[in-house]
Image (spheres, grey):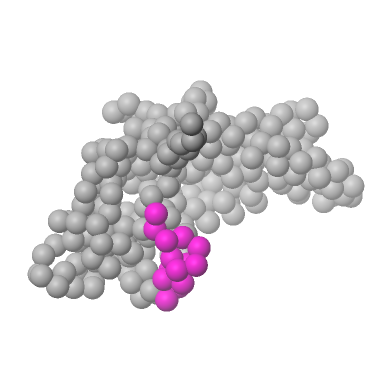
Amino acid sequence: MSSATCTLLEVVLDYWRSLPAAKRAGFRFHHVSTDEVYGSLGATGRFLETTAYQPNSPYAASKAASDHFVRAWHHTFGLPVVTSNCSNNYGPWQFPEKLIPLVTHQRAAGKRLPVYGKGENVRDWLYVDDHARALWLILVSGRPGETYNVGGDSERRNLEVVEGICDLVDRLAGPLPNGGSRRGLIEFVKDRPGHDQRYAIDASKLQRELAWAPRESFASGLERTVGWYLDHRAWWERLRAGVYAGDRLGLEKPEKKVAP
């Protein structure tokens, strides 16, 4: 991740330097990052743009390194950059490996779905259209060298999200053949490695400087999302058949046995 970012920064720097002065002044390199770079929160508090980095997974560490390289290119070479760190995105067209589409697919089919640990991990959910608006505002109006946090102000425990999807599928697609609720399909499994306990974004800087605020509540956004997946089965069933079968990711690979 970080080596690819460096390659991109080198190419962009050469391009930016080749531009006429007027176009150089209006150019921006927008680096899109994640809240995972900040690590894990306790029961209170939110991530600020000034929160110290403490990545706890290889993915988060690679994203943190990329953030630092972008900042270095700005301060060393003057490249006009803006960075955004966002919370969990959701909405239509999301790859079916992610929590909300995966739970929707499994529940629509009446299949059981494992929930990591006790489902107590907390995430801040951001509807994709709200994020897209924020990205555009930051690109065209953000101050060079600045970082902007983007969050949906919608903290939920994973179990709450799964239960909410169960209730929506029951309502929109009808109950199970036996008349039962899909909440009865929930089962808890061993937590995945490096699973941070809680993320929460403070997006007040973005709201204050660029007049952005999420338009979609989590309740309305979740209903729109679940409804979309139920109405577009052919799209995700094709992916499930050819690309991703719904297997649980992040498991440790079993050790290979060597013959004596």
Q: Magenta: predominant secondary structure element?
A: helix
Q: Residue 110: x and y, percent?
A: 23, 65
Classify 260 as above or below 219: above
- The question of residue 236 being in magenta is answered with yes
- Along the line of sight, which residue is nearer the eye, 153 or 192? 192
Which quarter of the figure has residue 177?
Answer: bottom left
Q: Is residue 138 left or right of residue 220?
A: right
Residue that appears at 30% across and 42% down: 116
| Relative vertical location of residue 228 with respect to residue 182 in this rendering, above or below | below
Can the viewer see residue 177?
yes
Residue 188: x and y in percent read 23, 44
Which of the 4 image quarters holds residue 61? top right
Instruction: Tell me where the magenta segment starts and ends, as one range.
Output: 234-247
Q: Residue at x 56, y 41 (%)?
A: 33
Image point (54%, 46%), residue name:
210
Residue 200 appearing in the image: no
Q: Residue furthest front?
A: 260
- For residue 80: magenta? no
